[in-house]
Amino acid sequence: MRILIAEDDDPKCQRLREFVAQEFPDAEVNVSRSVTSALASLRSSLPDLLLLDMSLPTYEIAPGEQGGRPQDFGGIAVVDFMDFEEMVAPVIIVTQYETFPMRNGENMSLEVLTEKAAAEYPLVFKGLVYYSSVENTWQDPLRSLMMGVLGGSVGNEDSLR
């Protein structure tokens, strides 16, 4: 089983990798840290699951570089590409933001984002998890969504609690 994590925040990415390794020890995990690298990875080979951050930079950030324009909806750009190319791979959005700024100056809540993603991408969108760097409250919802996508027979038996 192959899992792609599209995440640019190093501590969050590391915690997600550790979580996946604990819950699905046989999974091959690849990481993309930008919209561009996520698209390249998807073009190369579709994963069995994509754990997708919402706010991704355009390009990989190298030392001394900015990584291009930050995109509040970089994750949606990735899913839009998948939709346009008719790529079907399950997507779980994992975000640490409670709201997202919109062009009209208002903010989009996680609830509205979840509803919009479910309506616009019904074949791939499997759910949204609010990630906290302080608490582990994100782990149970993520585990549940991943088990729903990847099946209960896969992974660590301790994860079937």
Image (cartoon, rainbow, N blue to C red):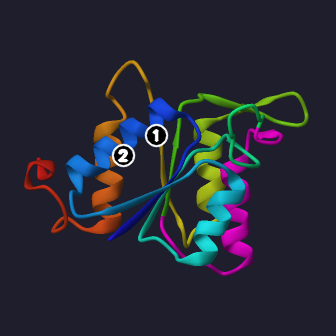
- Local crowd size for mark 1, using a 10 Å CA cut-off: few (<14), some (14–19), many (≥20): some
Residue 97, image x, y percentages:
59, 29
Residue 101, image x, y percentages:
78, 31
- Local crowd size for mark 2, using a 10 Å CA cut-off: few (<14), some (14–19), many (≥20): some
Q: In which quarter of the image is residue 41?
A: bottom right
Q: In this view, does 34 lie to the left or right of 102?
A: left
Q: Quadrant of the N terminus?
A: bottom left
Magenta-tinted stretch:
67-90
Is 52 inside the magenta-drawn segment? no
User: Type of residue at label 1?
Assistant: Cys
Q: In which quarter of the image is residue 29?
A: bottom left
Disc assigned to residue 120: none
**Residue sticking out furthest to the bottom:** 86
Q: Is residue 13 above or below residue 34?
A: above
Residue 159, image x, y percentages:
15, 49
Q: Quadrant of residue 17?
A: top left
Residue tagged by mark 1? 13
**Residue sticking out furthest to the front:** 63
Q: How far apart are marks 2 and 1 (CA)?
A: 6 Å
Residue tagged by mark 2? 17
Task: Label 1, secondary structure: give it.
Answer: helix
Task: Label 2, secondary structure: give it.
Answer: helix
Tell me if label 2 and label 1 are in contact, CB under 8 Å: yes
- Residue drawn at (67%, 40%), measured in percent from left and top? 55
Q: Is residue 81 above or below residue 55?
A: below
Is 69 inside the magenta-drawn segment? yes
- Residue drawn at (26%, 50%), measured in percent from left and top? 21
Q: Is residue 51 left or right of residue 105?
A: left
Say which of 142 and 51 sits in front.
51
**Residue sticking out furthest to the top:** 134
User: Type of residue at label 2?
Assistant: Arg
